[in-house]
Amino acid sequence: YSYLNYAAICAAAAGCRTAILDIDYHHGNGTQDIVRGMEDVSFASIHADPATDYPFYWGHAEESGGNILNLSLPRGTEFGAYDAALARALDWIVEDTPELLIVSYGADTYAGDPISHFAIQTSDYFKLAQRIAALGLPTLIIMEGGYAVDALGANVAAFLEGF
């Protein structure tokens, strides 16, 4: 779906220890492939279980290791379970002491999104962003997805307000 991987490009150009947090509905398989093994970049992805959702062949827990953490969630995941996965990802990120955080943000985790099978509500995006912002790291947010066009503006605004 992408010709340029903006998260990986920004991480490579940052010139400092960088963490990429992918919170788009789908696994960031391209990002994982590009940054795997990079000493100054860590990558954590919270995404739909690849056993049931695209990209199917990437994003399994057993691919985690080194600078990669994959946290897949089942269809129907609500805020509480998603928030717990986010807390785990952020704890893992902090262990690597990054100087910059890049967030691949996708509002396609929204309950009303036509491709999502999660149950995240608009008000939940504010809380997710607050948790991320609490790290106190300089943060670059890259918009990755969101296909519930009527709700997209409200979901993005709620997320940004959380910062």
Image: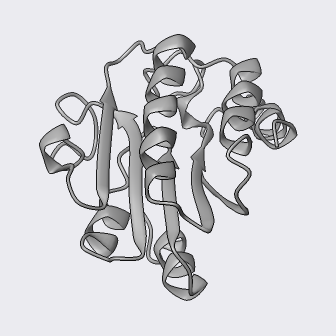
Residue 115 showing in the rendered view: no
Q: Quadrant of the C terminus?
A: top right
x, y percent for residue 11: 52, 76
Res. 98 visible in picture: yes
Instruction: Identify whether 140 is placed above or below 132.
Output: below
Q: Position of residue 138 (x, y in %)?
A: 73, 63
In the image, residue 155 above or below residue 40: above
Q: Residue at x 31, y 32 (%)?
A: 72
Q: Quadrant of residue 43?
A: bottom left
Instruction: Indicate left or right for 141 with 52 as reference.
Output: right
As rendered, which of 86 and 118 lies closer to the eye? 86
Q: Residue at x 74, y 51 (%)?
A: 136
Q: Quadrant of the N terminus?
A: bottom left
Write the residue at 72% across / 25% down: 127
List x then y, in percent, for residue 53.
Answer: 27, 33
Q: Is residue 67 above or below residue 44?
A: below
